Image (cartoon, rainbow, N blue to C red):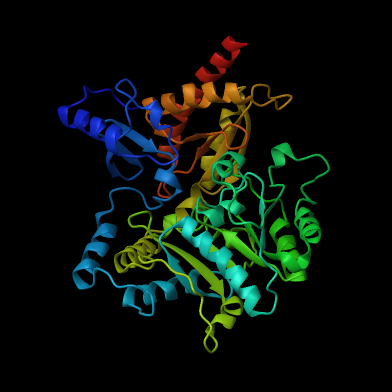
Amino acid sequence: MATTEPISQDAQSLQELARRHLWLHFSRMGAYDAEHEIPVIVRGEGCHVYDDRGRRYLDGLSALFCVNIGHGRADIAQAGADQARELGFFTNWSYAHPRAIELAARIADLAPGDLNRVFFTSGGSESVESALKLARHYHKLTGHPNKTKVIAREVAYHGTSLGALSATGITAIRQPYEPFTPGGCHVPNTNLYRLKPGYGAETLAEAVAERIEFEGPDTVAAVIMEPVQNAGGCFTPPDGYFQRIREICDEYDVLMISDEVICSWGRLGEWFGAQRYGYQPDIITTAKGITSAYAPLGAMIVSDRIAEPFLQGTSSFTHGFTFAGHPIACAVALANIDAMEREGVLDNVRANEQAFRDMLESLRDIPIVGDVRGAGYFHAIELVKDRETKASFDDDESEWLLRGFLSGELYRRGLICRADDRGDPVIQLSPPLIAGPDEFAEIESILRPTLEDAWAQVQRRR
């Protein structure tokens, strides 16, 4: 549990500078003032991080689903420093450098099937943006110029750039930036706890075929889905779901994009989430854990079939980013993958996944816990005010429950996780892939009393 220490002069200076100059992402900047500090994390070690007062926290979110190998790995950072001495930077625009070549080959070797072409980016939104542009361009080159639409799932998050935002299915994130790139279409997600009327687990995939028919098959370029959907709270697919999506995509000449910005690099116990669920996409988008976040890097991994039209004559995928495939980031990624293989990180996830799930399942005796779901080291607890009816919290209730109590209280007690209501209210947990039973026990020791206190507050407010 975090301990409270008097704030030092240096820490106070950081607070003042941050409030004056630093614009935090996805944050209510007006919530921070002299009485409400900005959390300032100054160092990390293994599964824990420390703030500017020396308080210790279990990082139950891997920072943002990305510090897969844990904090404080000087050897991973050193790979970047060594590369900087050799070649600090050169672009991938019509040039190559050894680390990008080596990393592309390494990724192709780990990726499923014939996903052998690697287009580097600087992060997740860029990877998704690249995939959506590639899908449109591919269909133009192959004689289907009207195939521009993309089908995604409701409440899904695919990034913040205007193209990726068209696929994102979260109304509150979309509305401030409309109009944006047209063509985003949405179908029900795989929230089996709250199935929409008329749908069953065995029929959810058919919604994609129905939407393609509605839009017109000659207008749909791609389907984009996460193996486990993040927003809404770790929705896993029913048996056979992705196999049926693959069949539908083949039937209608639609590209299948597996958005694995979170679900790759061991998060689900495999290098890629598509391997966990046994399907073969045309494109994988990835980022985050590729470097365990020790340097910013992403990638779009493309099948030989989809790449082929771009490899002929004067064709070119007229798209790119200055820092994509940065030599330092590629060196860090190679060191990260080496360490994951050498230290059996994927084996650790597979060996301990059930213990992690069992710990979360044990919280079902607290009435506020409605559902527990997820896979690998990527799980969510859905919070309800009536477990029998599955009654959820309305917007005002969710506001005081998540932001007024849970987020701050979990952090105060020493646990970093996500209290989120981009669908129904959930607590998400995604610890570093090196975590084990000791870390799970620490999570439980904080999460259980905090959820019990939250339920007591719900009762008092009735």
When asked about the image quadrant of residue 442, the answer is top left
Which quarter of the rendered picture does the C terminus lie within? top right
Q: Residue at x 28, y 53 (%)?
A: 73
Q: Residue at x 57, y 31 (%)?
A: 362
Report whether 389 appears left or right of 126: right
x, y (%) of residue 454? Answer: 53, 20
Q: Residue at x 39, y 71 (%)?
A: 103
Most extreme residue toward the right is: 198
Depicted 258 relative to depicted 65: above or below: below
The foreground one among 348 and 381 is 381
- Res 225 visible: yes
x, y (%) of residue 399? Answer: 54, 25
Which quarter of the rendered picture does the N terminus lie within? top left
Most extreme residue toward the front is: 179
Q: How many marks?
A: 0
x, y (%) of residue 397? Answer: 59, 21
Most extreme residue toward the bottom is: 313
Depicted 158 relative to depicted 302: above or below: above
The foreground one among 59 and 164 is 164
The foreground one among 139 and 103 is 139
Most extreme residue toward the left is: 9
Q: Residue at x 35, y 65 (%)?
A: 323
The foreground one among 430 and 315 is 315
Depicted 32 relative to depicted 339: above or below: above
- Res 265 visible: no
Report whether 427 appears left or right of 24: right
x, y (%) of residue 108? Answer: 49, 73
